[in-house]
Image (cartoon, grey):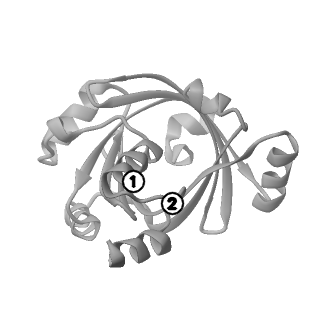
């Protein structure tokens, strides 16, 4: 989502600071943010995300992410490195670049020794609220609102303005949230995909 940030347009590598909040209904939140007349940076769009790692899971062990995301026909390759997680806020270095052909990019990564580690999808809407970005996500395991801003105080201030409970904020990635959910409900699948999880929930 960094391509929407003015700073990131000038800096291909920079620090991502964000907090994630579970919400009851993404559609309801989109309507609420629309009603506030906020700038809509991205209308509700489907994302498919593929995370790669080595067979030994070296990236995961060192809190790094190599991800290929496809959205609205556009592919983006992303590298992230976690710096710290504190008080419900995640601090990460992030480097992104657009890719002209996601299939060829995946082949290159696999030839270099990386393999598909985790696939997840979601629907995302993005709004700008002053100097923060609000990402409303509908995922197979629930809905979330992410606030990304320049510092902790700004993120906290906007969370308060939106009436969010800071005690529910988390710095966890979707991969971590999915793993915790899967353990809780005894889901044995590797990936966080709507079709697989909806089929599981019908029999759960």
Badge 1 density bin: few <14, some 14–19, many ≥20, Cα 10 Å: some
Q: Residue at x 24, y 25 (%)?
A: 153
Can residue 105 be seen at all in this image of the molecule? yes
Q: Residue at x 54, y 27 (%)?
A: 63
In this image, 127 relative to 97: left or right? left
Residue 48 figure quarter: bottom right
Q: Is residue 55 above or below residue 86?
A: below
* Disc 2 and disc 1 in contact, CB within 8 angstroms: yes
Badge 2 density bin: few <14, some 14–19, many ≥20, Cα 10 Å: few
Can you tell which mark lies on residue 189? 2
Tell how many labels: 2
Residue 130 figure quarter: top left
Residue 83 appears at what percent x and percent y?
48, 20
Q: What is the secondary structure assignment of the residue under circle 2?
A: loop
Residue 128 appears at what percent x and percent y?
35, 50
Can you tell which mark lies on residue 33? none
Residue 102 appears at what percent x and percent y?
75, 59
Q: Residue at x 51, y 40 (%)?
A: 6
Residue 64 appears at what percent x and percent y?
59, 30
Q: Is residue 87 above or below residue 190?
A: above
Distance of label 2 from label 1 (alpha carbons): 8 Å
In this image, 92 relative to 94: left or right? left
Q: Residue at x 37, y 59 (%)?
A: 137
Mark 1 = which residue? 182
Which of the image's four quarters has the C terminus? Answer: bottom left
Q: Is residue 18 above or below residue 123?
A: above
Nearest the viewer among 105 and 55 is: 55
Nearest the viewer among 175 and 188 is: 188
Q: What is the secondary structure assignment of the residue under circle 1?
A: helix
Earlier in the chain: of badge 2 and badge 1, it is 1
Can residue 11 be seen at all in this image of the molecule? no
């Amino acid at each position: 989502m960094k391509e929407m940030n003015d700073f990131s347009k000038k800096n291909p590598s920079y620090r991502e600071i964000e907090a994630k909040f579970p919400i009851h209904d993404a559609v309801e939140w989109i309507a609420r943010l629309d009603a506030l007349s906020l700038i809509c940076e991205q209308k509700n769009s489907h994302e498919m995300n593929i995370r790669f790692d080595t067979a030994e899971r070296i990236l995961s062990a060192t809190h790094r992410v190599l991800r290929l995301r496809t959205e609205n026909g556009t592919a983006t390759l992303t590298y992230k490195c976690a710096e710290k997680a504190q008080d419900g806020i995640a601090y990460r270095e992030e480097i992104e670049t657009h890719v002209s052909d996601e299939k060829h990019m995946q082949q290159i990564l696999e030839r270099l020794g990386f393999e598909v580690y985790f696939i997840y999808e979601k629907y995302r809407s993005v709004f700008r609220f002053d100097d923060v970005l609000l990402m409303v996500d509908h995922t197979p395991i629930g809905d979330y609102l992410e606030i990304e801003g320049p510092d902790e105080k700004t993120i906290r201030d906007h969370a308060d303005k939106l009436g969010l409970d800071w005690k529910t904020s988390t710095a966890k990635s979707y991969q971590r949230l999915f793993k915790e959910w899967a353990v809780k409900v005894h889901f044995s699948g590797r990936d966080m995909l709507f079709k697989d999880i909806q089929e599981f929930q019908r029999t759960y």
